[in-house]
Amino acid sequence: MRSPNIHQLNKAFESRVRLGIMSVLMVNDSLDFNSIKDLLQVTDGNLASHAAALEKEGLIHIKKEFVGKKTLTTYSATKVGIKAFEEHLNGLEKLLKLKK
């Protein structure tokens, strides 16, 4: 079995905000913009830019629709995103189990 190393971690999850977005989406089928913003305590712009980066990588899906006259933006993890995040967590767990 290969020894775990830092290169097994996914660079897309290096940011605390991206890590937070993926974490909340792993335990929720989908969440709206304001719910994620409140949970992570980040600004609108910060959430939007990090979510866009995750969407560009194919890790999350962003759905925008109108409810009445208001825009509703919801986020969900893609199958690719779920797999990538699980592999990232597994890599972290392996690193945590290393002994000197």
Image (cartoon, grey):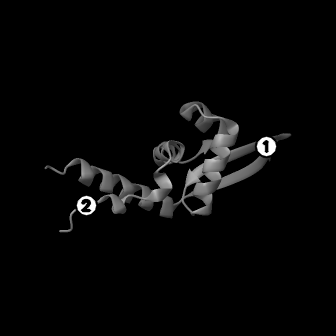
Closer mark to the observer between disc 1 and disc 2: 2
Neighbour class for label 1 at 10 Å: few (<14), some, many (≥20)?
Answer: few
In this view, which residue lies farthest toward the front?
A: 100
State the residue in front, 70 or 45: 45
Instruction: Of the two numbered discs 1 and 2 on the same chain, state the one appearing first in sequence.
Output: 2
Q: CA distance from mark 1 to mark 2?
A: 44 Å
Judge from the rendering whether residue 38 lies leftward or rightward of residue 64; answer left or right. Answer: left
Q: Position of residue 47 (x, y in %)?
A: 63, 42
8, above or below 50, in the image = below
Residue at image coords 65%, 47%: 74
Residue at (54, 43) in percent of width and height: 17
Residue 7, position as x, y percentages in the image:
35, 62
Farthest right residue in view = 69
| Amino acid found under the numbered disc labelled 1 | Thr
Q: Secondary structure at mark 1?
A: strand
Q: How many marks?
A: 2
Up/down of 7 relative to 30, above or below: below
Q: Residue at x 61, y 58 (%)?
A: 55
Quadrant containing the N terminus in the rendered view: bottom left
Describe residue 54's horizontal placement relative to residue 4 as left or right: right
| Residue lying furthest left | 100
Residue 81, disc: none
Amino acid of disc 2: Pro
Q: Quadrant of residue 94?
A: bottom left
Identify residue for label 2: 4
Q: Which residue is mark 1?
A: 71
Say which element carries label 2: loop
4 to the left or right of 42: left
